[in-house]
Amino acid sequence: MELNEKQQTLLRMLPGIDHILELSKAEPSFEYVPKSVLVQSARRVVENFRAAILDENKSIEEKDLADLSVFEKIKETVKKAMTPNLMRTINATGVVVHTNLGRSVLASCAAENLLAIATGYSNLEFDLSKGERGSRYSCVAELLCEISGAEAAMVVNNNAGAVLLCLETIARNRKVIVSRGELVEIGGSFRIPDVMAKSGSILKEVGTTNRTHLKDYMAAIDNDTGLLLKVHASNYCVVGFTASVTLKELVELGSKYRIPVMEDLGSGTFIDFSKYGLSKEPTVQESVSAGADVVTFSGDKLLGGPQAGIIVGKKDVLDSIKKNPITRALRIDKLTLAALESTLRLYRNPEKAVHLIPTLRMLTIPIELIKKRADKLYKLLSKINNPALSITLADRCSKAGGGSLPLLDLPSRCIAVKIEGVSANSLERKMRENMPPVIGRIEDDYFLMDLRTVQEEELSAIKNALNNVLNRNQ
């Protein structure tokens, strides 16, 4: 590639890394920045300028390569490099259990206990009463049994791991009978048939997509059958001409043929949401009471705790699962246990749990309170007093999210925002790039912020974010 005279001149003007490092000594904000970060940032900026010079479609002038201009770019790059990749965001999407935004928000008591355990030693695997090694599951096992009514309990790192572990322990090299309509796929292309294959069990699907009967299970049972599996379709719903077999019916069938029964609840909940005017979801207590040998569910969805896969059920089955070598590969750490224990303790008083666990509180909050919060934010944003800014109140619906309650539309109140000369997509991006990021959604060419998932203490941060966008747009 032949360079023109201007390109050659600009390339000669590019500062050397040593020169940039010398300039950085006079920058106060770089006092605690590691040299490796400075060097990497300087190289990145210089290489970006070099690429821009060589690109005939980009316009680079000599003033762009002055020390001050280049150094400002390096300061921005250093700041970005020193900012944690994982950061707190403001969820204004209206999706309560938002997988991309970290799913459930922990209760304050869970966060406090997590911090206490993280910053010191703990009795993770030490029995304080006996003065000898103990089990890391003991701090939550009794609580889970108390709340669910199960004989035994244990916890692994997520529900996919729990399902894999249970299938591998109970039914390796044996058939697992499951309804065709329950062969679900969840986020990340996790599919029940795939995890069954990895467990070494053999899938035997029965029935049809919309209708499965008890006789279908009975016809499929043979000497190689190791498990009857029921999977709760928590992230979709088949309606219309449908039929399914209840867990209680499966348990009776399993008892007759001496075949264990497992239910994967997916999201899993200890709360009967129908009491709060929401869709009825099967509770863990109901599954245990129906007689399932094993029940698995997530800790970080409708339960409102940290990511975990919870296993409850009959003691003899749980004892064999605990002995499986895979258990160690899937075990959870002390931080997860600390947050989970604090969350579970709240469920001893269900009414208190609904109030103190953010996920439950956001799902059950009365629409009147959401409207009050929306009015408060509307008044705050009205004080910005910028003619380019247009804000209106809009009635919309929120979602439970996290593969839970798929048909449930939760009435909510949103703030709809437009900025003159700024597209909705551009506004969404600019709010997302703010510190802290404000994540909303786009509808009808408006940037929407749903107040169901916005916390009271985040309202002023939203105002600041919009101010920042307006100031940069001037």
Image (cartoon, rainbow, N blue to C red):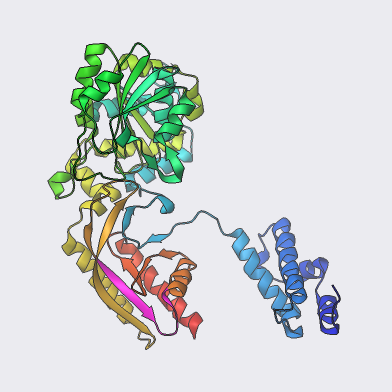
Q: Nearer the viewer, residue 198 or 439?
A: 198
Q: Is residue 106 magenta?
A: no
Image location (x, y in percent) of residue 97: 34, 50
Q: Is residue 345 above or below residue 376?
A: above
Instruction: Classify residue 38 by image quadrant.
Output: bottom right
Q: Is residue 23 above or below residue 96?
A: below
Q: Is residue 297 left or right of residue 327?
A: left
Q: Is residue 330 left or right of residue 457?
A: right
Looking at the rendered structure, the number of numbered marks drawn on it comes to 0
Q: Identify the residue at image location x=42%, y=54%.
A: 101
Magenta segment, which residues?
Answer: 413-424
Instruction: Classify residue 385 by image quadrant.
Output: bottom left
Q: Nearer the viewer, residue 162 or 374?
A: 162
Q: Is residue 288 left or right of residue 105?
A: left
Image location (x, y in percent) of residue 305: 34, 42
Q: Identify the residue at image location x=16%, y=64%.
A: 368
Q: Is residue 416 magenta?
A: yes
Q: Is residue 352 visible from the viewing direction of this image?
A: yes
Q: Is residue 347 above or below residue 167?
A: below
Q: Nearer the viewer, residue 59 or 255?
A: 255
Image location (x, y in percent) of residue 178: 32, 28
Instruction: Classify residue 456 by image quadrant.
Output: bottom left
Q: Is residue 137 above or below residue 426?
A: above
Image location (x, y in percent) of residue 395: 22, 69
Locate the N terminus by quadrant.
bottom right
Q: Nearer the viewer, residue 193 or 51?
A: 193
